[in-house]
Image (spheres, coloured by chain):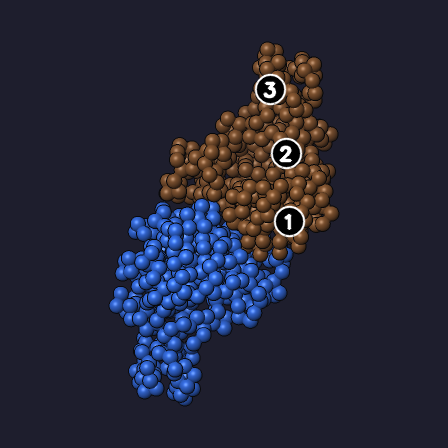
Chain colours: A brown, B blue
Amino acid sequence: MKVGIMGAGQLGRMLALAGYPLGLQCEFLDPNQDSPGGQVGPLISGGFDDRECLARLARDAAVVTFEFENVPMAAMDLLGKCTPVWPPAEALGASQDRLDEKTLFRRLKIPTPEFAAVDGLEDLRRAARRIGLPGILKTRRLGYDGRGQYPLRRLDDIEPAWSLLGKAPLIYEKFIAFSREVSLIGVRSTRGETRFYPLCANTHEAGILRYTTAPYRNAPLQKQAETYLKRLMRHFDYAGVLTVEFFVRRGQLIANEMAPRVHNSGHWTIEGARTSQFENHLRAVLGLPLGDTAAVGHSAMVNFIGTLPAAGNILRLSGVHFHSYGKEPRPNRKLGHCTVTLPSREARDRILRTLLKLRA
Amino acid sequence: MKVGIMGAGQLGRMLALAGYPLGLQCEFLDPNQDSPGGQVGPLISGGFDDRECLARLARDAAVVTFEFENVPMAAMDLLGKCTPVWPPAEALGASQDRLDEKTLFRRLKIPTPEFAAVDGLEDLRRAARRIGLPGILKTRRLGYDGRGQYPLRRLDDIEPAWSLLGKAPLIYEKFIAFSREVSLIGVRSTRGETRFYPLCANTHEAGILRYTTAPYRNAPLQKQAETYLKRLMRHFDYAGVLTVEFFVRRGQLIANEMAPRVHNSGHWTIEGARTSQFENHLRAVLGLPLGDTAAVGHSAMVNFIGTLPAAGNILRLSGVHFHSYGKEPRPNRKLGHCTVTLPSREARDRILRTLLKLRA
């Protein structure tokens, strides 16, 4: 059975590897011929808006899905005429635009930082006055890993921020002084079956996820986060994995952003949960029964960014698994990750400290 | 980094899938163009004795390994001139011939059923008298899944057994009335690091492995089995996964046969152990540190033979994972397996009973 995947990055690669045991053959569409996905499965090399390539991807596919947010909506429309496409286009659309996303959060009573649309310098001045400083000016679209953002600490930052980002539609958000960033990964199948992984805690460096620990055990926050994801899933009549990142402030969750796909903060589930997010995403979009999402121990996932340590230095550590994405090293590029899963949190944290010191 | 694999059956397929996260690209040599391995990685389609194909497999490979026993020794010699080949040819050779194998077991003081070489009808009569009945006449080479065997219960069985199998070199073995068949999977790296999985218990139907449960907790037998495998590993200066099947009789182990490769009775390790036999085989032949072999719960692996149940009927069961090999159904063909891993033995056994009743 064939599954089409828009994008052949590491998320697509891990989807394809999870698909093989299920008897699935994932085929990718990606303009990059030497992609992480293309190394493990068939690749259609072409643009995401190429009608001929889209038709090939959809041909004989039981379902088409995507592994990144910036799939053109026109491509979703075209694909949807030939084959089922999950997650739904409306969820993808909301995730592509920070203003739409936060407006939806507000509508569904999911707490979110105060925000305002910014379409001119005057808008920005007004937003900074009304919402206050510090805050962050962000492009509404195409930002990731901290790109397309400008932090505003004083009124003097307004003009430089505007001159750097002002060419695109923007959103101004209040800066949230948070104690922790967590994310919840949920999955809902086309038959409506729904499961949630335990919350995980995320630590960023220079705007890029550096490591995740799981499970983040906090029953009230877990329940609250699940309530919010259920609202989103119902709203979209969702199928697939859905991720929402939250700030934790004074014991409350504030939604930062959603991703209608498998997520970097869920990589620990390959070894650390009974069923990985990748397998569950495939089960969900195909209408198969979902797998158990319970954690099997205490896990930490560490991203390797820019350089990759030698495999031997990673694998000599107890309980550690290594995932290379087959990419050429480049600054700020996610080249691979490793996961440690151990029965106790203390043992996990000891190995985590060593992993964070590993260099190429 | 490239790893060459002789054979592209399901064992090769699962090796390749374990290799991708480690940044390895497995390439197969197999005459069958539509093989389970060839669906997940590059395949050189050709005979195992084709010099040109063997040279291609060895080219740029960090190591060549194999996934079945009947690799021609001439191919091992040729490959060995171009690249490291593990496990060692001597271990492969011993496993190809039941007489050599049992003679080696005896030499290393590993208990084995009484046996005798049979090269003529008179040999067989003499063996049956000396060793006694019941017994089994087996071809020395090329037998698997119960093929090439003839059970002898009475003296009258001698002539029909001889007329069926007498064209090939044979071995007569005493029939062992055993209470249990278990297997031990061990792994030794090219650097000499050695680890063992917990023993598992195997149940056959019509000569083919039907299901395995693990761990089979018996500390004295575990220790005894590890001692025997260590002797074999030292003898061969072994690297890779090594499997030995034992009968348990009156609390003692009697070695039935060895396989110098990953083994069907080790499939449970994908979900049921901290590191799978497939990943550890690759780590071992590449000289990487070995992964933890501890079980993470109670597992059972069920083979699907001849027919494959619908994925949905398997996946709806709690704690169950499915592995399709991408093969066309055919009687007596192993088409896939599933593994259940659960925290308690009782829960595992409940699901196992359901799995054994699943039909296509």
Disc 3 residue type (three-letter): Leu
The quarter of the picture where the N terminus of chain A appears is: bottom right
Mark 3 belongs to chain = A
For residue B285, above or below residue A6: below
Q: Height in image: A7 above or below A138?
A: below
Residue at mark 1: chain: A
What SS does tag 3 mark? Answer: helix
Q: Earlier in the sequence, mark 3 or mark 2?
A: 3
Q: CA distance from mark 1 to mark 2?
A: 26 Å
Lower position in the chain sequence, tag 1 or tag 2: 1
Quadrant location of the C terminus of chain A in the rendered image = top left
Identified by mark 2, the residue type is Met
Q: Nearer the viewer, residue B332 or B184?
A: B332
Residue depicted at x 35% and y 71%: B97
Q: How many marks?
A: 3
Q: Earlier in the sequence, mark 1 or mark 3?
A: 1
Give SS at disc 1. Answer: helix
The disc label shown at residue A57, or none: 1
Could you tell me residue B312's position as x and y percent?
63, 56
- A23 horizontally vs A287: left or right: left
Element type at mark 2: strand
Mark carried by residue A258: 2
Residue A235 is drawn in which quadrant? top right
For label 3, the residue is A164
Q: Residues within 10 Å of mark 3 (few under 14, many from 20)?
A: few
Q: Amino acid at mark 1?
A: Leu
Q: Which chain is mark 2 on?
A: A
Outermost residue on the left side: it is B107
